Amino acid sequence: MERTKENSPSILLFPWLGIGHVNPFLALAKKLSKMNFHIYFLSTPIILKSIKKTLDKNSSSNNFPIQLVEFHLPYLHKLPPHHHTTNGLPPHLNSTLIQAFQMASSKFPSIIETLKPNLIIYDGFQPWASTIASSCNIHAIMFFVSSTSNLAYLYHQFLHGIPSLTSFPFSSLYLHDYEIKKLGMQPIEPRDDKAFGYIILKSFEQSHDIVLLNTFRETEGKYIDYVSTIGNKELIPIGPLILEEAIGEEEHFVTIQSWLDKKEKCSCVYVSFGSERFFSKQEIEEIASGLELSKVNFIWTIKFTIGVNTTIEEMVPQGFLESTNGKGMVIEGWVPQTQILNHSSIGGFVTHCGWNSILESMSFGVPIIAMPMNHDQPFNSRLVEELGIGVEILRGENGEIKREDVAKGIGKVVGEMTRKEVNLKARELSEKIKMKGEKVIDEGVKKLLKLLC
Ligand SMILES: *[C@@H]1O[C@H](CO)[C@@H](O)[C@H](O)[C@H]1NC(C)=O
Ligand SMILES: *[C@@H]1O[C@H](CO)[C@@H](O)[C@H](O)[C@H]1NC(C)=O
Ligand SMILES: *[C@@H]1O[C@H](CO)[C@@H](O)[C@H](O)[C@H]1NC(C)=O
Ligand SMILES: *[C@@H]1O[C@H](CO)[C@@H](O)[C@H](O)[C@H]1NC(C)=O
């Protein structure tokens, strides 16, 4: 079917306010707009502002521009509009943001009545989007942006109660004791409508017939099949969808590139822990000392919450910047992650294992040195080990980060021992991803079109 501006179906995309959610939704928006769908992208003004920067550059390359639509959260004293995003949000305001987002659901009906989209693609944090859509006779489907192995675990836990890891059929996805105890991996109380896991599953159940997944069969096939069976939905893996130029990244690449250009192939690690995790001074010291002990080259990006008045110099151990001068580069704030991972001097990625980072690492064939923190990250890390594309850094009994273990983890990937095997596996996976190309998304879109008729 040839689609023209006049008969082109419209799709409203509506992610949760986390950067790790907005990015894959935006990547999907770009793909769909290239396939001549009219796209509405619904988010808060602060998020749209950062997206706009990346869209402006290429506005002429899309015949069907992505139309940004503002979603206003209610005014709460504690939560000024620049905090209507998880980016830089002080952790104590995190539940306030969720609350404000839920409150704003009352604005959703009038938005969809005005825009009249043919389809809504919503995120796991807003099951109400689907309820409201169906009351307006619009189909709504969920796009799950995290790993399906994590979804499998949530589902299993929900169906089988607590403690359920023992009966979980995938023993490769276990949790360390310190993760169960310390990282807030609380079991889901069935029907506790404040628990994240429950909200996600409710979103899943509300999804009209199908659920889109940002993953692919080669890595998560068995988890996809499992969830599809117990959840009784058709799951469509359309990943890995990554945003080549992620939002919020400044253009410091020229400096970084010329620095990387001078280094030997696979001799550097890239160290980044995502946009929502902030370390204590002591943790930063352990990581810094670990990097120094490992003796490899590194690019390390550190983020502070907005409003925290500190500097890199104050946070790293005294003398660290001097003693690693030439060997390491420490950068505050955003860096162009995909471009760094795509550089041939990068031989490993020290990451918190956010799903987008994992997908990017897989796409560029960079082995992972895993340091998972919370949410789905421990499972993502176990998956990395299962696939043989990386190693996990060991922790102390209570989950504490220790310099020797950081150095050892890095050494296993960028050092001599396991370097070959892990590298090979990572390279192979990235080749598979490249071979698939646009095939998966094309197939996914065919199924979406059926829902539109
Ligand atoms: C912009 O368009 C050019 C050429 O079509 C493409 O190579 C580039 O990746 C695009 N950039 C973004 C941010 O989409
Ligand atoms: C945000 O709050 C939720 C619930 O209070 C918690 O589970 C989660 O870990 C928090 N996230 C961050 C980044 O602090
Ligand atoms: C941040 O700290 C610097 C030096 O310690 C000080 O000069 C500056 O006024 C502080 N800024 C804020 C916003 O507190
Ligand atoms: C990755 O690098 C290669 C060349 O080294 C280049 O052709 C390709 O476009 C780059 N990909 C991205 C997404 O930057």
Image (spheres, rainbow, N blue to C red):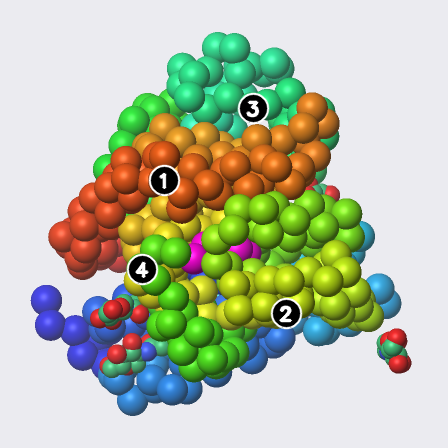
What residue sits 53% from the left and 55% below the top?
271
Question: Which sits earlier in the primary sequence, circle 2 or circle 1?
Answer: 2
Under mark 1, the amino acid is Glu
Label 2 and label 1: CA atoms lie apart by 30 Å
Provide residue 445's location: percent of width, then percent of height: 22, 56
| Residue 416 tag number | 1
Where 211 falls versus 34 (above or below)? above
| Range of magenta residues | 268-272
What residue sits 67% from the left and 28% below the top?
396
What residue sits 66% from the left and 37% below the top?
402
Label 2 vs label 3, nearer the camera: 2
Label 4 and label 1: CA atoms lie apart by 14 Å
Q: Quadrant of residue 311?
A: bottom right
Residue picked out by circle 4: 265
What residue sits 37% from the left and 53% below the top?
347
Label 2 and label 4: CA atoms lie apart by 25 Å
The kind of secondary structure element at disc 4 is loop
Residue picked out by circle 3: 175
Provide residue 264's location: percent of width, then percent of height: 34, 62
